[in-house]
Amino acid sequence: MRPAWLEIDLTAIADNIERVLSVLGSQRKLIAVIKDDAYGHGATVIGPVAQRCGVRMFAVSLIEEAIEVKSVCSGAEILILGLVPLDAVPTAIEHGFHMPLDSVDRAKVISQAASAQGTAAKVHLKVDTGMHRIGVPADEVGQLCRGLRDLPNLDIRGIFTHFASAPDDPLFTTQQFERFQQACREAETILGQRLPLKHCANSAATVRYPEMWLDAVRPGALLYGIPRNRGGQYLPTMDQALSMKAKIASIRTLPAGEKLGYGRTWQAQRTSRIAQVPLGYGDGYDRHLSNKGEVLLRGRRLPVVGAICMDSTFVDVTDIPGAKVGEEVVMVGSQGDETITIAEIAEHCGTVVQEVPVRMNVRLPRIYTCQPGDERVAHFADRYRSATSDVSA
Ligand SMILES: Cc1ncc(COP(=O)(O)O)c(C=O)c1O
């Protein structure tokens, strides 16, 4: 196997899911967002693990993702968050996927396709309350609903919206929530039916605003343990499931004054031992971490030096004189008492936590681990986790 890999701790995933489920109680649903290959964690494993832990409904972006999830999670309800291309609507209906509805024109296409199949299409009204990405503008919900009244074979299962700034703008989030509630009331009045699934809370809103949990929450990042604020008043701390690891490929000594790597951006201030770790930006270890990031070796933080290459990263191991080729370096994750969080990486890279694991998903082998004897997930794991981070045995 390549001496660089991603490790996904299924015990952490199962714990995180169970934490959310236990806080939600039996009256509310968890719609687990596993789009983009479960944020790089592998939807075909995370889906079944989540199902095993009690998740009954998933959300993805694309019909292709929905088909993949259905193939491994039989019986699960699957909501496609993105607008389904009109020519794919019949397929989505055949599979029984839930689809967003944002206009009367789209509703007509869905209604016709469902009628042609002699079935009802499951739809959720998607309301734009301020994100301005997908959805009927909140003040046009009434018009949309009036247009739906005469269309057959639409099974309106729910109504949802998406927050633009839930992590950092409580005022705007509250405004969006109020617009959403108003839209829900209007839709139910005009349609003359209760919409069973009202949902708006992504991870940040799930963590901060229990009043926004409504009938279901729709978190992604939280389940993988990667939100910026870890734990809070309403939810326990989540565990980061993903680690990125590699074994030192070579070590060389550079005299003081020597410069290193592409662009020669780092200069040795002393005689330095530089390890070459065989993964780089081609594996999603972002180039913005050049001369900024830190990694763990023997439980200690060491600096990334020089520019990160497509397939290699340099680490200054001078402070660990015994460091040797073949030793395990943790680029993301824990070793001993230290942890490099995904949030830390995201901050260095000036991006959101969600982007970091998604970009690490390109060509690294994935190893699934779990705590010894974790009956919930052992079946899905390649290995048990050892007490240390080293699973290379
Ligand atoms: C519509 C929608 N709902 C929920 C989520 C989950 O977001 P998060 O990962 O912040 O929980 C996303 C992700 O971007 C989304 O697009």
Image (spheres, grey):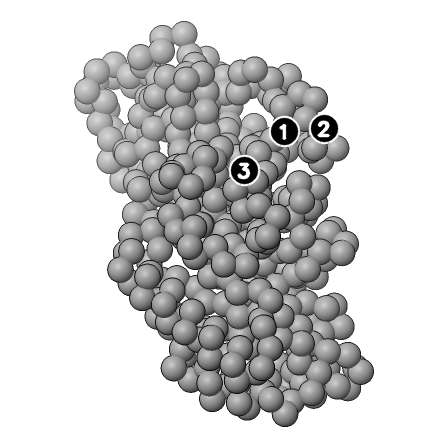
For label 3, the SS is helix
Q: Which mark is residue 375?
A: 2
Residue type, mark 3 in image = Arg
Residue 134, percent across and down?
45, 73
Residue at the (42%, 70%) spot, across then down: 180
**Which residue corresponds to mark 1?**
369
For label 1, the SS is strand
- Asked whether the beta carbons under mark 2 and mark 1 sit within 8 Å of each other, the answer is no
Neighbor class of circle 1 (other Cα within 10 Å; few <14, some 14-19, many 20+) is many
Q: Earlier in the sequence, mark 2 or mark 1?
A: 1
**Which residue corresponds to mark 3?**
19
Residue 36, percent across and down?
55, 54
Residue at the (42%, 41%) spot, across then down: 234
Mark toward the viewer: 1 or 3: 3
Q: Nearer the viewer, residue 349 or 214?
A: 214
Residue at the (71%, 83%) spot, across then down: 153
- Asked whether the beta carbons under mark 2 and mark 3 sit within 8 Å of each other, the answer is no
Is 209 rendered above or below residue 123? above
